[in-house]
Image (tube, grey):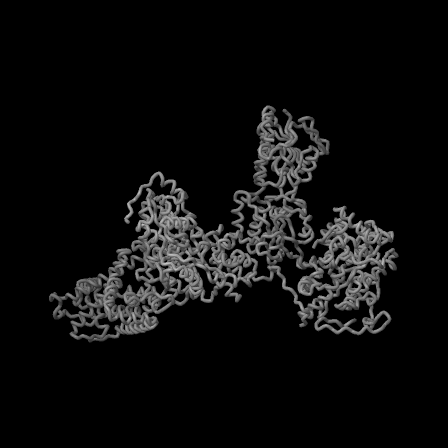
């Protein structure tokens, strides 16, 4: 393979068709309350970890729902599991279980 | 796909195209990229259609590349464009036709600006007068050379010796049309068929017997984008754009790509080589690429001109497979001979792209 | 004649079960860590042994705790355990005295009436009453049978025994139970038929019963009696063989557990020999099913300790069973065997999340903590109930205490939620970060408003400073007379947060403090019996609806007496109740703060304040 | 003051107003352009949020059509004269009607999705509008619509022709959001295994039970919502569609293939409304909908005494509110006709 001094850029676009929806479906089965998320961001705003780092649980969930799961493992490692997110969620989403379920299904899918 | 739906839209985007007395301005880059094209345009217009196409050797760049690369200020650009108009006026012409899509877009942009800001136009007139002592009238009609060919597509078809069909099977050839971004994306009303479903090339393909392929990334830019290509660090982005299109059109197994912009055929052609060298991937059948032609080259083929006079030998993706399908005769031996038959030497074959295909 | 083939099933079964028990005990004791091993060894040579023996007597034989839960249930267990024990004991005495030998084949006393049926009068029968043993043994047999009758009754009338849900048993358990139930009727029949056939040799029950049979059914003869001896021996034999594989393994294991406990051996964080003993000590009585709110409120009856522990024993723990628990500690409190169900559950959770790596490298490294005497830690949850923090600040300020708030602008989680989820390893980083901060402050007292934090501070942080919940601390300064405290006539109910009550054993301080500022009404389920609010961080998969039900049911319990305010001492409980409670929900700290005169012009900031002005009186404070 | 009331437009507003006015003993002339009363109710299947059959609502409205109302169908209006308070309405077929008051209830038209060229409506095979979907449901022809779909992934695009400067409509059409949610649920009932994706900018669940229906859509039916306006659609060789949208919640462009694309088309003022408003000289706002005399206290009268308006001529509105508005209009017409009260009203009017 020749090197012309530049490479072919990867696409930033979310390709929903090719993305991994298996993890999403597993997690949704394990925690159906995620279905009713309205992405208001209260969880992220109150997040204990969020005040020290860029951890954004709302975005973690959104990425999961788009099948963009490659970077999630690194993200959810930052969760302190304190449960504040759950207390502020206007739709009663069980967010701590999102972290657990995600850990597990990422595990299973070797991601 | 409902063709009648498209036709409805095409009806809405009819533009007036002059049919004679053209003032023709060339592109800065095309004569290096595809040397035969502009020559062929003049040959068709003058020899085939007996039209008056005037050229002035002292016309300059429109500075579009500099403008889009953010190194030429708009007022400078306007003044240079004003000068082109002045040359047209001096030549007693009113129908301005450009070989370059970026110029075409820019001329429209400038005229539109002047329309909304007459004071700017006035200032430019002053600048031009001070700098060159010239003054100008605005053209009555501005069209891109592809508009003109589109306008005469039926005449060309009538005179044509070949059609866009596989002469062995009689099936129409599958053609991808790619429009330069600056043709109608800025001013849909200035392009034949508008911006979403441009008809300028599709019309030629239809009338010359081919089948237009509509594929998902049809709208996407070829990737030239000036800064993207000119700055080496950005070329990864440029090539990614072309690749996106190839991936999207591959499944339709097109016989060729037809273009109307200086940059597009260049990059759609050369990037096929680059991608094959970088990833070993080719998009045509058995290691071949997808031939990329300019509308003049294609018109030339339809009219039965010698492929090597059209400059098809300088394409990176060999066009022989297309010629074979159309049944256009050619002398492989002459491909790399100069105008006076002198040997130009054979290019080194790429590692993956099938450059010397078996020919019929 | 001192042998007959029918004794073999019993005899072999006995040998098998004895060896099995010895083997398991040896293994379990072997599995203890060195510290516990020494405790065990020393225990044997200490008065603790007697304490153990007496507990074994009172609990394993008399089942005192069972009696406390329900008299019928207690009697049933006692009659079985104690009755059988006495049958064996007295039977041995009788046989030994009869044979005059000190050593007998072990089956001899069990089947004595088969081998001897003369009109013997034993030498030195107590008070030389003829046939005393025959009489006494029959009495014991009837006593035991009465237990059997209850046991059968319990199948259909479990509510009489205080059960709403009873355990669904496995096949082995059913087989074992059937044999156990057969043993005593078979013995009755065998002895009665024999007595009947011979016309003498039985006690008051067996003899008369035997005679009756002989009268009604002249055909009955020694052969039928012999058949019953076989059945008797068989049911014993099969019971012994199934025992190790059934719940009845709890009978021997429980004894060892009692010994361990009395020797000061405690549950470990990792699954150990002790845990194994706990697991096998579970009698699957099912008391934990009804105590569990996930059963009573959420209607899930399959995840309670009885099944959970069973799944550990069968080595097929399912995550959803392990996770489906609030770790509120009610079952632990109710377990008649005193198994630490919570620690067992957390141990199992750990096994699932071993490889869940966490990364808290983002935590700020060196932080400047101002030196202070008293350090106040609100905790994550308190930041969602700022009224608690405000109240605490007012109290501390009024008392003129030099304090600093450690998590003024946001807390690093204490780690307890991770521990509860079985991610103890991951929690350590957070703990370390907090410990550094706490120590850096040079404080001598750490006060927290969150029982969840309190528990982990006490159990896992090993801080060498005084860790207190704010209720304790406030009470202390009230007693020192550092704040002028007033009361107003408000009837309040107090909810014991799980982590504060069952978790840290703090029941009295909050109540004592409350009585100083309000009139405390009684609640049906309180102190160690208190319900969980439903907000527990220990629980993971339960749906919102089910959680809400838990909260609502508890509110019914707490608000039965229509208190004006529902008081708790945990931000999480407060937040959880607030969602469903019509009645105002407050933290104790808020009540105290509101009873204080306003500092620098600011007035108390809520309804309590307004009410107060009309109806308050000073209370004499002991200084 | 004793001539009948002429109502132009026999849709929901027109029918209800006619019923109310004639109930008070006033003679009513109801003119309808088409051959049938009912307006858009004739096109819908079931109504949000109760999923009530629209035919049922129509039956209720028809009950109000009593002898006091003379209905004239196929009424193509050629001219209207206003002889200080007496209105002469001429029809193209020569018929003529006189009235003491005029109520304009000519409603709205649905946006022509062809105007959003990049969405490919009328060009790609599987792009349809929400109105067409209602037709499918209405005639139980869903099977025709859904046959031959493999994966059954369906996209629903919000705000088509609404909140869009590019088509000259800056306003929100209000009912599309809830319509999208309703239709998503209906499709899911039909094809439980289908995946449904709604592409929205905001979800404007403005009325009672709407938010609950949205919740149901997520919680019970697992319908997905992606925040981002669709920029363009393209057709694949197999006639499925590639949708391009920015998923604004991840901040990344997103591309997905759907089998069917449903465009939630909004309201535009009906050409008839514009024409008649022109004849009568009623002012219309920048959005093309008609302007009322006072948006709070004279919300059905216009700058011209005796000319009243009601329903969707005033802007996007749901059926429930149209009926309420029609009743309010009836009241204003009646009180105008009672000249005493009319004077009093005018003096009362805030403007």
Q: Could you say which is closer to the camera, residue D174 or residue C438?
A: C438
Say which quadrant the N terminus of chain C sits in. Answer: bottom left
- Say left or right for C344 vs C11: right
User: Quick check: can you spot residue A91?
Assistant: yes
Q: Is residue B120 above or below residue C173?
A: above
Depth check, front residue: B267 or D7: B267
**Does residue D177 sit above or below B243 in this rendering?**
above
Query: Relative to the observer, which residue lies in front, D87 or D62?
Result: D87
Q: Residue furthest top?
A: D340
Q: Is residue C457 left or right of residue B146?
A: left
Question: Residue A111: x, y in percent?
Answer: 53, 65
Q: Nearer the viewer, residue B105 or C192?
A: B105
Q: Quadrant of residue C2?
A: bottom left
Question: At which x and y percent is residue C428?
Answer: 43, 64
Q: Position of residue C291 (x, y in %)?
A: 35, 55
User: What count of labels does the image hold?
Assistant: 0
**Above or below, comparing residue D291 to residue C284 in the picture:** above
- Image x and y of residue C9, in percent: 28, 72
- Left or right: residue C39 compared with residue C393: left
Q: In the rendered image, is residue B140 in sight?
A: no
């Amino acid at each position: 393979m020749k090197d012309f001094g530049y490479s072919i850029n990867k696409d930033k676009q979310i390709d929903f068709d090719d993305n991994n929806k298996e993890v999403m479906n597993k997690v949704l089965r394990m925690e159906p309350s995620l279905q009713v998320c309205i992405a208001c961001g209260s969880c992220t705003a109150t997040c204990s970890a969020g005040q020290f780092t860029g951890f954004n649980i709302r975005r973690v969930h959104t990425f999961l729902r788009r099948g963009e799961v490659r970077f999630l493992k690194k993200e959810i490692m930052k969760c302190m599991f304190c449960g504040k997110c759950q207390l502020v969620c206007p739709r009663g989403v069980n967010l701590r279980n999102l972290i657990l379920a995600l850990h597990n299904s990422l595990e299973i899918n070797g991601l | 796909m409902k063709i009648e739906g498209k036709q409805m839209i095409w009806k809405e985007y009819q533009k007036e195209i002059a049919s004679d007395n053209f003032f023709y301005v060339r592109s800065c880059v095309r004569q290096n990229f595809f040397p035969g094209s502009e020559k062929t345009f003049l040959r068709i217009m003058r020899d085939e259609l007996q039209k008056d196409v005037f050229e002035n050797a002292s016309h300059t760049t429109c500075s579009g590349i500099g403008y889009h690369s953010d190194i030429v200020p708009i007022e400078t650009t306007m003044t240079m464009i004003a000068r082109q108009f002045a040359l047209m006026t001096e030549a007693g012409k009113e129908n301005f036709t450009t070989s370059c899509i970026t110029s075409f877009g820019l001329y429209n942009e400038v005229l539109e600006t002047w329309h909304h800001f007459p004071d700017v136009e006035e200032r430019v007139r002053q600048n031009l007068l001070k700098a060159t002592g010239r003054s100008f009238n605005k053209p009555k009609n501005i069209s891109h050379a592809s508009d003109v060919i589109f306008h005469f597509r039926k005449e060309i078809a009538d005179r044509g010796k070949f059609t866009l069909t596989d002469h062995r099977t009689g099936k129409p050839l599958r053609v991808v049309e790619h429009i330069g971004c600056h043709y109608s994306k800025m001013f849909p009303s200035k392009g034949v068929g508008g911006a979403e479903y441009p008809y300028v090339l599709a019309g030629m393909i239809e009338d010359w017997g081919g089948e237009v392929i509509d594929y998902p990334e049809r709208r996407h830019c070829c990737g030239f984008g000036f800064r993207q290509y000119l700055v080496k660090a950005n070329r990864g982005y440029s090539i990614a754009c072309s690749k996106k299109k190839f991936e999207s059109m591959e499944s339709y197994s097109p016989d060729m790509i037809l273009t109307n912009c200086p940059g597009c055929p260049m990059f759609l052609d050369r990037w096929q080589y680059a991608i094959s060298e970088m990833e070993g991937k080719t998009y045509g059948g058995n290691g071949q690429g997808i031939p990329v032609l300019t509308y003049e080259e294609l018109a030339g083929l339809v009219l039965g001109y010698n492929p090597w006079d059209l400059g098809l030998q300088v394409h990176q993706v060999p066009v022989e497979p297309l010629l074979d399908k159309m049944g256009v005769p050619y002398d492989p031996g002459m491909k790399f001979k100069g105008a006076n038959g002198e040997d130009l030497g054979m290019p080194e074959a790429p590692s993956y792209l099938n450059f010397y295909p078996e020919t019929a | 004649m001192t042998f007959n083939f029918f004794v073999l099933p019993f005899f072999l079964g006995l040998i098998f079960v004895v060896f099995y028990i010895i083997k398991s005990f040896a293994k379990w004791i072997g599995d203890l860590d060195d510290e516990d091993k020494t405790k065990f060894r020393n225990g044997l040579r200490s008065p603790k042994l007697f304490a153990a023996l007496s507990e074994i007597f009172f609990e394993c034989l008399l089942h005192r705790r069972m009696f406390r839960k329900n008299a019928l249930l207690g009697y049933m267990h006692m009659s079985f355990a104690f009755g059988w024990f006495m049958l064996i004991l007295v039977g041995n005495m009788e046989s030994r005295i009869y044979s005059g030998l000190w050593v007998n084949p072990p089956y001899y006393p069990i089947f004595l009436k088969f081998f001897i049926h003369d009109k013997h009068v034993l030498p030195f029968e107590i008070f030389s009453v003829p046939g005393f043993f025959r009489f006494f043994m029959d009495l014991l047999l009837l006593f035991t049978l009465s237990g059997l009758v209850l046991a059968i009754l319990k199948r259909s009338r479990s509510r009489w025994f205080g059960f709403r849900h009873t355990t669904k048993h496995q096949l082995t358990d059913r087989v074992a139970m059937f044999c156990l139930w057969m043993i005593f009727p078979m013995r009755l029949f065998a002895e009665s038929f024999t007595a009947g056939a011979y016309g003498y040799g039985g006690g008051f029950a067996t003899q008369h019963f035997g005679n009756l049979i002989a009268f009604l059914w002249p055909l009955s003869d020694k052969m039928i009696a012999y058949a019953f001896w076989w059945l008797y021996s068989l049911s014993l034999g099969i019971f012994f063989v199934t025992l190790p594989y059934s719940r009845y393994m709890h009978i021997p294991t429980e004894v060892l557990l009692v010994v361990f406990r009395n020797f000061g051996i405690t549950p470990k964080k990792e699954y150990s020999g002790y845990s194994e003993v706990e697991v096998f000590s579970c009698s699957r009585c099912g008391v934990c099913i009804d105590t569990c709110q996930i059963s009573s409120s959420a209607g899930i009856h399959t995840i309670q300790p009885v099944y959970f522990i069973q799944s550990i024993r069968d080595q097929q723990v399912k995550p959803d069973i392990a996770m489906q628990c609030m770790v509120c500690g009610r079952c632990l409190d109710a377990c008649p065997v005193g198994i630490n169900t919570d620690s067992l559950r957390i141990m199992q959770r750990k096994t699932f999340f071993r490889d869940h790596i966490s990364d808290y490298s983002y935590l700020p490294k060196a932080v400047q903590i101002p030196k202070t005497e008293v350090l106040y830690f609100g905790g994550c949850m308190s930041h969602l109930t700022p009224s608690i923090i405000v109240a605490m600040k007012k109290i501390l300020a009024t008392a003129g205490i030099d304090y600093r708030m450690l998590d003024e602008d946001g807390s690093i989680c204490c780690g307890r939620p991770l521990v509860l989820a079985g991610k103890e390893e991951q929690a350590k980083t957070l703990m370390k970060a907090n410990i550094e901060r706490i120590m850096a402050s040079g404080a001598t007292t750490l006060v927290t408003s969150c029982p969840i934090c309190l528990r982990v501070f006490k159990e896992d942080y090993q801080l060498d400073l005084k860790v207190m919940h704010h209720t304790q601390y406030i009470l202390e300064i009230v007693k020192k007379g550092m704040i002028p405290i007033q009361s107003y006539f408000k009837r309040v109910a107090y909810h014991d947060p799980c982590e504060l009550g069952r978790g840290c054993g703090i029941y009295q301080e909050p109540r004592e403090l409350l009585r100083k500022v309000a009139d405390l009404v009684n609640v049906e389920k309180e102190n160690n019996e208190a319900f969980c609010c439903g907000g527990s961080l220990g629980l993971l998969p339960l749906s919102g609806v089910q959680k809400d039900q838990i909260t609502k049911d508890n509110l019914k319990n707490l608000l039965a007496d229509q208190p004006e305010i529902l008081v708790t001492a945990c931000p999480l409980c407060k937040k959880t109740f607030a969602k469903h409670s019509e009645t105002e929900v407050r933290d104790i700290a808020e009540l105290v703060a509101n009873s204080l005169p306003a500092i620098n012009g600011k007035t108390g900031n809520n309804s309590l304040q307004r009410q107060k002005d009309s109806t308050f009186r000073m209370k004499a404070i002991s200084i | 003051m004793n001539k009948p009331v002429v109502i132009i437009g026999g849709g929901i507003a027109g029918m209800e107003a006619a019923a109310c006015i004639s109930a008070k003993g006033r003679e009513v002339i109801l003119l309808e352009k088409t051959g049938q009363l009912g307006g858009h109710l004739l096109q819908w299947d079931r109504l949000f949020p109760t999923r009530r059959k629209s035919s049922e609502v129509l039956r209720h409205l028809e009950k109000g059509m009593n002898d006091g109302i003379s209905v004239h169908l196929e009424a193509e209006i050629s001219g209207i004269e206003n002889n200080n308070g007496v209105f002469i309405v001429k029809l193209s077929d020569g018929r003529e009607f006189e009235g003491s008051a005029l109520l304009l209830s000519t409603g709205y038209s649905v946006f022509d999705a062809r105007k959003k060229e990049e969405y490919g409506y009328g060009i790609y095979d599987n792009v349809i509008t929400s109105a067409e979907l209602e037709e499918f449901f209405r005639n139980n022809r869903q099977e025709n619509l859904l046959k031959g779909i493999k994966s059954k992934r369906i996209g629903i695009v919000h705000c088509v022709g609404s909140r869009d400067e590019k088509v000259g409509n800056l306003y929100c059409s209000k009912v599309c959001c809830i319509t999208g949610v309703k239709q998503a649920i209906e499709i899911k009932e039909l094809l439980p295994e289908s995946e449904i994706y709604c592409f929205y900018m905001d979800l404007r669940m403005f009325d009672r039970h709407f938010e609950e229906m949205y919740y149901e859509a997520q919680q019970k039916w697992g319908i997905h919502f992606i925040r981002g306006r669709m920029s363009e659609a393209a057709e694949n060789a197999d006639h499925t569609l590639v949708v391009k949208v920015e998923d604004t919640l991840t901040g990344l462009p997103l591309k997905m293939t759907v089998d069917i694309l449903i465009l939630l088309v909004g309201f535009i003022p009906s050409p008839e409304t514009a024409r008649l408003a022109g004849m009568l000289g009623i002012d219309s706002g920048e959005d093309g909908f008609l302007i009322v005399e006072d948006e709070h206290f004279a919300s059905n009268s216009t700058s011209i005494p005796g000319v009243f308006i009601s329903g969707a001529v005033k802007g996007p509105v749901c059926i429930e509110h149209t009926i309420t508005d029609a009743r309010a209009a009836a009241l204003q017409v009646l009180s105008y006709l009672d000249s005493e009260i009319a004077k009093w009203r005018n003096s009362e009017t805030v403007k």
